[in-house]
Amino acid sequence: MELYEALYTTRAMRRVSADPIPTEVVQQMLDAAIRAPSGSNMQQWRWLVLTDREAIRQLGELYSEAFDAGMDTFYAGAEERARAAGATDILRIHSSSRWLRDNMRSVPLIVVACDRNDPIGSSIYPAVWNLMLAARGAGVGTTLTTFNTHTRHAETLELLGIPADKGWRVAAIVSCGYPLGKWGVAKRPPVEKVVYQDRWGNPTDWDVPEPLWGAKT
Ligand SMILES: Cc1cc2nc3c(=O)[nH]c(=O)nc-3n(C[C@H](O)[C@H](O)[C@H](O)COP(=O)(O)O)c2cc1C
């Protein structure tokens, strides 16, 4: 797959089938992940690959609980506000997120990314993104989730046998599977809405009204 196609179309692909993912694809995803950069090349990461149905079911249950707790606290009222404002894009994310809340227990593969000794907590995310891009290249959809990093975290560590006493924490849970929907270019406000030039607030002297990959290719 062409680089830009992967960069532009690797979306949060929550709705996936239960079809198993071949081991060669799982290997490729993890091998790509660990090629990523990390601060001082410390590679303070461990990856838990869940393919056992019961292990996935149990983590899926815990994800549902973490999701509900998150929706009752920091996302409280968000769905109602979006509905009142007629914000269909946001409502679509909520609906898709709820699908994953209800179905993570039956996806074919979950990858749990764990890190430690990283005060900023950012070193693992390039690797997680590598994993997601490699999955995209193989036609596998992924969703990076973080509810369990701040809600039900202790229970997640315990369920998976992650040694918290050695400093390990869950940085992300990535659900994976073959998409039920279609790939498409990620919709975002155009570049010039979020980029300044030389000094905060200065507009760029160029703009990018349409995505530079996709429409014309
Ligand atoms: C750091 C991070 C945390 C996220 N956490 C969750 C999550 O817990 N659950 C979920 O369903 N999606 C989660 N997402 C997915 C985002 O909601 C998604 O990437 C965003 O809505 C853009 O979607 P799109 O690329 O398909 O347009 C997370 C994404 C990131 C980057």
Image (cartoon, helix red, strand yellow):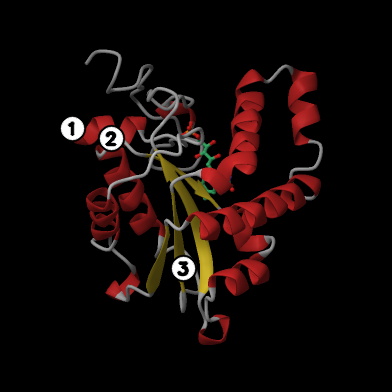
Question: Which mark is on residue 114?
Answer: 3
Which class describes the residues within 10 Å of circle 2: few (<14), some (14-19), or many (20+)? some
* Three-letter code for the amino acid on which mark 1 is drawn: Glu
Indicate the secondary structure of the residue bearing disc 3. strand
Please determine whether, in this image, residue 94 is positioned above or below residue 157: above
Is the C-beta separation of discs 1 and 2 under 8 Å? yes
Picture residue at 45% right of the left edge, 58% below the top: 52
The quadrant of the picture occupied by the C terminus is: top left
Closer to the camera in the image, 143 or 189: 143
How much space separates mark 3 and mark 2, taking CA atoms? 24 Å
Picture residue at 37% right of the left edge, 44% below the top: 20
Which class describes the residues within 10 Å of circle 3: few (<14), some (14-19), or many (20+)? many
Q: On the image, numbered disc 2 is attached to which residue?
A: 6
Q: Residue 177: where, in percent of width, then height?
A: 41, 40
Indicate the secondary structure of the residue bearing disc 2. helix
Closer to the camera in the image, 104 or 94: 104
Picture residue at 68% right of the left edge, 49% below the top: 64
Please determine whether, in this image, residue 52 is positioned above or below residue 93: below
Q: Which of marks 3 and 1 is nearer the N terminus?
A: 1
Q: Is residue 32 left or right of residue 144?
A: left
Please determine whether, in this image, residue 115 is positioned above or below residue 4: below
Q: Is residue 109 left or right of residue 29?
A: right
